[in-house]
Amino acid sequence: MQTSDPIERVRPCDGSRKLPVIGALLGVLLTVAVPASQGLAAEAASPAATQAPWLDTRLGFEERAAALVSRMTLEEKAAQMQNAAPAIERLGVPAYDWWNEALHGVARAGGATVFPQAIGMAATFDVPLMDEVATAISDEARAKHHWFAAQGQRGRYQGLTFWSPNINIFRDPRWGRGQETYGEDPYLTARMGIAFVRGLQGDDPVYRKLDATAKHFAVHSGPEADRHHFDARPSRRDLYETYLPAFEALVRQADVDAVMGAYNRVYGESASASRFLLRDILRRDWGFKGYVMSDCWAVDDIWKNHRIVATVEEASALAVRNGTELECGQSYAAALPVAVRKGLIREAEIDEALTRLMTAR
C-alpha cells in the first residue's frame, strides 16, 4: 500500500547543482578525450594550449568558458553556436554535435532499452517510476557517449545534450506528436517532467550527468502542418494556467539546463526569438540560468515563413539578441558575422551567448 501520493514522492532537487554537464570540455575533454591522432597533438604540446586559462581547474566554469571564447575569432564563435559545432584545433576544442534524443530511451545510437512512450508513462501517475526510468536512460546514454568518445566519434546522437522531455500540453487528439507528451494536465505534466529531468541530469553537486532540454517553448500543441506559419494567441490566463506551468516547474524545481524554442509564433513573435518568452518570462521572471536553443531550422522560419524580418542576417541577430544561444540549423555560422558588420548585433552579445554554451560544454 502506498502511504503517500505517488505524484508527490519525488526526490528533492539539490539547489547546489551547477550547470556544466560535459565538465571535461574545459578540462578533461579538451586534453584527454581528444586523441592526438585527430590533429590536436601539436597544439596540445605547445605552451599556449597546455597553459591556457580554460584548462585551469582552479577557476570557475564560467570564467574558463569566457577565457576560451575570448580567444576565438568572430567566425569561430558563430560556428560554435550551431548544433554541429566544428573543432577549433588551434585551441584544442573538439567537434561536438548538440543533437541527441532520449524521449523514452536513448534514440538513434545503437541498441538501447526502449521504455513506454511518454503518454503511457503519464498514465501510470507514478512519478518515482518516471525518475527511475530517466535514471536508467541516462546511465545508458553516458555509457554510449564514453564508448563513442573512446573511438574518436563526436557526431550526431553521440553527445550528452538530450532534447527531451516534451512538456507541451496535449489538447487536441489530432496532433500527431501528442504521444510524446504527458497529456493534457499541466500539473501532471510538470510532476512527470521534473522527475524525468532529475533522472537525466543526475544529482552530482558539480557535474551534470547529461543535459536535459524542456521543449517546445511555448504554446506548441499543433496543428502540426501549420507549425512553421502559425501564430498562437491564447488568452493570458490560458497562457499562464495551461501552457507555462510545466516549463516554470522544470526551471524552478528541476533546474533544467536547456529550453528549446518552438517553431510557431506567440503573439506575433517567433517563439525562438521572442523577447516576451525568452527574456521577460524565462530569464527575468523565472531566473533561468541555462541556455536556449531553437527547434531545427526555426531561425529560417523567422524570415522565410513568419516573415518577421527580411533576411537571414536579421533573423539570426534577432534570435540571439532575444535569447536563443544555440541554433539547430545552419544559419548562424555565416549570418552572424555579417550581422555584426552590418550593426544588427554586437560581438559582445555573441560572446555572452557563446559563454553560456561553452559553460555547459
Image (cartoon, rainbow, N blue to C red):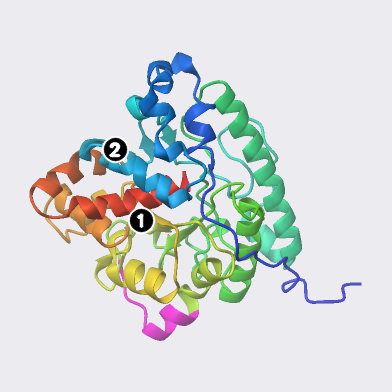
The CA distance from mark 2 to mark 1 is: 43 Å
Residue 286 in the image: above or below residue 90: below
Q: Is residue 180 left or right of residue 44?
A: right
Numbered disc in front, either 2 or 1: 2
Frontmost residue, 333 versus 306: 333
Q: Position of residue 2 (x, y in %)?
A: 87, 72
Q: Please tell me whether mark 1 sits on a helix, a strand or a loop.
A: helix
Residue count near mark 1 (Cα–Cα under 10 Å), binned few <14, some 14–19, many ≥20: few
What residue is shown at x 22% (from left), y 37% (from top)?
Answer: 75
State the residue at coordinates (24%, 39%). 333
Give left or right: position of 129 versus 289: right
In the rendering, which numbered label is found on residue 10? none
Q: Position of residue 216 (x, y in %)?
A: 44, 60
Instruction: Give how far across and how far down residue 253 sits, in percent.
Output: 58, 69
Residue at image location 26% in from the left, 57% down from the top: 319
Give the residue pinned by disc 1: 225
Residue at 31% x, 47% y is 297
Residue carrying label 2? 71
For the residue pair 73 and 315, the one nearer the viewer reads as 73
Image position of 331 with respect to 250: above or below: above
Q: Nearer the viewer, residue 288 or 188?
A: 288
Instruction: Tell me which segment is drawn in magenta.
Output: 231-241
On whether residue 239 falls in the magenta region, the answer is: yes
Q: Nearer the viewer, residue 352 or 108?
A: 352
Say whether residue 281 is magenta.
no
Amino acid type, callout 2:
Arg
Q: What kind of residue is marked 1? A: Ala
Left/right placement of residue 115 relative to residue 64 reads right
Classify 10 Å Cα crowding around label 2: few (below 14), some (14-19), many (20 and above). Answer: few
Query: Residue at the bottom extreme?
Result: 237
Q: Is residue 133 visible?
A: yes
